[in-house]
Amino acid sequence: MNLTLFIPELTLTVFAILVILLDLFVRQKRVLAQVSISGLVIAGVITIAMWGNSFPAIFNNMLAVDNFALFFKLIFLAVAFLVILASVDYTSRFARFQGEYYALVLLSTLGMMLMAGAADLITLYISLELTSISLYALVGFLKDGKSTEASLKYLLLGAISSAVLLYGMALIFGFTGKTQLGEIAMVIQTMPAQTLLASPALILGMVLLIAGFGFKIAAVPFQMWVPDVYEGAPTPITAYLSVASKAAGFAIILRVFFSAFGQPEWLSLNWGMIFAVLAAIGMTLGNIMAIPQTNIKRLLGYSSIAQAGYLLIGLAAMGFSAGADTAGRSGILFFLASYVFTNMGVFIAIIAISTKLNSDQIEDYAGMGKRTPLVALALTLGLISLIGMPPAAGFMAKFYIFSAAVQHNLLWLVIIAVINSVISAYYYLRVVKVMWLGKPASEEKISQSGTLKLALVLASLGILLLGILPGYVMRLAEFAANMRLY
Amino acid sequence: MIANYGYIGLFLIAVVLFTLLMVTIPIALRLLGLVPDKPNPIKNAVFECGMETIGKTWVQFNFHYYFYALVFLILDVLVIFLYPWAVSLRVLGVSGFIAVLVLITIVLVGYLYAWKKKVLEWK
């Protein structure tokens, strides 16, 4: 047992418990946010220190500690950091339950970190449940009608998707007799193709796994919960859901499908095709449904469905040549890194505006360019990045993923994606137009607190950095994309 | 592969036929006059096991029951973990002892939380 490789997770656990305990005895609740942030920073520093080395898996090969896992852990820690910075003001809405809020954010981050490293179906399921159960509670934190409805919907649909996922895992376990991903891969590769084809269990299990993971990443036939939950949840939690939860879903899909089902080639071609079709439907549906939305959180909900579609292109590219592909995998990692800053920037700007206006309607954003120019500028930058226009990070992210798809003969998918990007420009730019050209309801300036400004500046800098100097992060992503196989 | 599905199909057909048969047998026997028709109030009453209820069954319980149940459930789970550990304490050694200590600490924090949040007070 090598506990030293487990220190980032242990740190986070200790700090989550510390927050719960402090909440019971401390009257000044701002301390809780500071403690949570220091926990995240310490865990982040340790994770960075571990970067670059090649470690063996720990706990009987159940938890991988490769660069792939470390890359995702850093993403989750960064998102949780920004979320907590952004919710320091927001938590005044539920003054009684601040300790629980911060502790649950930390615990779900812990769950996601374990998800990124999970190299065994059982570890994977438990870490997924740790993440989900914390999130079910967080979504219902506002305790009003909409928030409770969102929480209940998320809980029920999440439970069903967990059941589907478990069923898929059971079929794969029944077929191979193993739960460890590397061992599953060994069993599949040593079996003759005839045996694999004789039984539909493996294909059925894979399809059920895709359905279960598809719920997490909001891929299209499993996206029904997204708009309602995004609208009802507290805005920082919406941001957290849309970025970290999605990234965690992609982390496990990448690891499971790359290391367990990556070979033989006809198998990876099969699931590559599934992902390609899901990507095409997801982008189109998400973008078209976003056009008539009037609530900005719902609009971003549909936009996140569309973004999941773009990300799935990377998975399809990986499936079409799992052996030789690195562009698809590193493209997904880069896209997720840029998506973290982009979506967090957009949501933090929305928190800054909406908490003051007490409204999420797009028409109420009229004249924000005059009332709070810096926030409006950051929101514009984030939306431009979501469209995928230079100089923002979203452009480079889309460029890498699309070029990976073209390399693997998926030109038709890229054409659909480019058409969709043009469609998406319409509704993103509509928000920009309302903000800068709309007539404001009042001339009163809107001011923000220091922490919120700090979070916004960090996110905007991230967008610009990844957009103008993508090379460095891209090298990190390429380095991380080479998962260790166990 | 199709042959495998064929077996399932056979089962499906058997299930449907069997169900239909079981439903139609009593009706057919009644129509043929083989079964006498003598209804009385006790025969027609809804079958229920146990005592007949007095008054409404849609009573609301105090929410605190659920708190107590949850708090007790955690203790239950803890005990399930402690028994196998206690039996093989010698084999597991110091590291096993520390692991269980950590588990108990985490559960204790939960109890402390419940206590401070007045879950254990009956109002």
Image (cartoon, coloured by chain):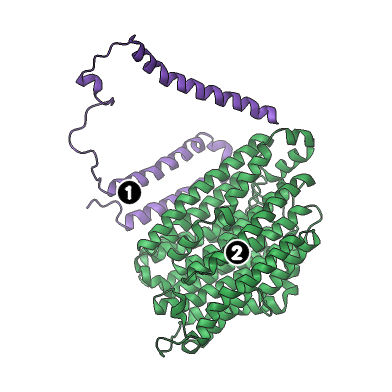
Chain colours: A green, B purple
Residue B81 bears which disc, if any?
none
**Residue ranking furthest to the left:** B55
Asked if residue A202 shows in the view, the reply is yes
Which residue position holds label 2?
A306
Closer to the camera in the image, B9 or A454: B9
Question: Where does the image place residue A229, in percent across and percent down from the top left?
Answer: 46, 61
Q: Residue at x 60, y 71 (%)?
A: A424
Q: Residue at x 68, y 51 (%)?
A: A274
Q: Viewed as shown, does residue A209 lie left or right of A138?
A: right
Instruction: Please identify the quarter of the rendering in which residue A304 is found.
Output: bottom right
Question: Where does the image place residue A58, in percent across and percent down from the top left?
Answer: 66, 50
Query: Please, is residue A81 above or below residue B47 in the view?
Result: below
Amino acid on which the number 2 mark rests in the picture: Ala
Mark 2: few/some/many CA within 10 Å (<14, 14-19, 20+):
many
Q: CA distance from mark 2 to mark 1?
A: 42 Å
Question: Where does the image place residue B44, in percent across and percent down from the top left?
Answer: 24, 22
Question: Where does the image place residue A385, in percent across and percent down from the top left?
Answer: 63, 75
Closer to the camera in the image, A271 or A130: A271
The local secondary structure at tag 2 comes to helix
Mark 1: few/some/many CA within 10 Å (<14, 14-19, 20+):
some
Query: Please, is residue A211 above or below residue A40 in the view?
Result: above
Which residue position holds label 1?
B67
Subunit ID for the residue under disc 1: B
Subunit ID for the residue under disc 2: A
Amino acid on which the number 1 mark rests in the picture: Phe
Query: Please, is residue A276 above or below residue A416 in the view?
Result: above
